[in-house]
Image (cartoon, helix red, strand yellow):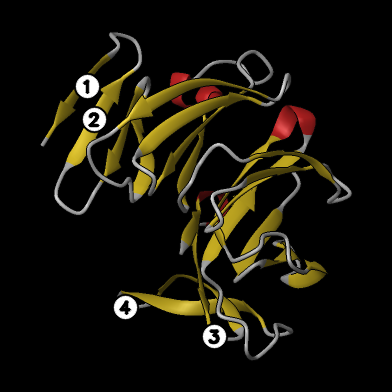
Amino acid sequence: MTAYEEEKIIITGGLGIIQGYGESQSYSYQIRELNNVDNIDPESWITNLYIERKNGILYAASDSNLYKIDIKTWKRKDYFKDLHEIGITCLTFYQPLEYLITGGKDGRIKIWNPGMHLVHEFSQHFGSVTGLLLLEEVCEASFGTLPILISASEDCTIRMFNFETMIPIYRMDNPEPCQGLYKVKKDVIYHYSKACVYIWNFESNTNSKS
């Protein structure tokens, strides 16, 4: 599930379908289906959704495959097979270089150019990649100034990669497998395990556990 705030739509994925829901106002507010993408393989279970807002593209992952959908027309534009060995677990997009970045259950992070040709692959993780964040979004810096990717994995590490130079630059070990990675506010992120939530402040370089 993901939110398309500009149009006030919640987008969900299921077995063979992607649906968009929004409010309708009559005597009371109701949530109703506004759109759907129905030319999806009926056996495809949509597990991850990501909106690339500048170009109006919705990326929808199903196992190791990826649908590319025009979010204005709700029509499928393209379909890419076998991008990862096992399955796609997370997605993000770096607008200055128009890179789509995918993480997989195979522990790989792959960077794709606009033609969906593989630019680079990071293979430092040894477990499923469970989260991807762009450092520029976390620090609220201008795009193009900090081309750094933050990743979390079930191998108990948080890593950083420079995807201009394609060099791994930082590794942080954790006591438990990381099951998700999210931004809280400027300079603050959290990742979580089965038992704990870990909060990291980039500005003060501190962390806390709850």
Q: Earlier in the sequence, mark 4 or mark 1?
A: 4
Q: Return the x and y of residue 172 as percentages of the image width and height.
A: 37, 25
Find disc 2 in the rendering and name its residue: 199
33 shown above or below 114: below
Element on which disc 2 rests: strand
Quadrant of the image containing the C terminus: top left
Q: Quadrant of residue 18?
A: bottom right
Q: Earlier in the sequence, mark 4 or mark 3?
A: 3
Instruction: Give the CA distance from mark 4 to mark 1.
Output: 48 Å
74 shown above or below 9: below
Q: Which residue is rendered at x = 28% and y = 34% of the image? A: 174
Find disc 3 in the rendering and name its residue: 15
Element on which disc 3 rests: loop
Disc 4 or disc 2, which is closer to the eye?
2
Dot 3 and dot 2 residues touching (CB under 8 Å):
no
Element on which disc 1 rests: strand
Q: Is 23 situated left or right of 42 in this image? A: left
Looking at the picture, which amino acid does disc 4 mark?
Tyr
Find disc 4 in the rendering and name its residue: 27
Looking at the picture, which amino acid does disc 2 mark?
Ile
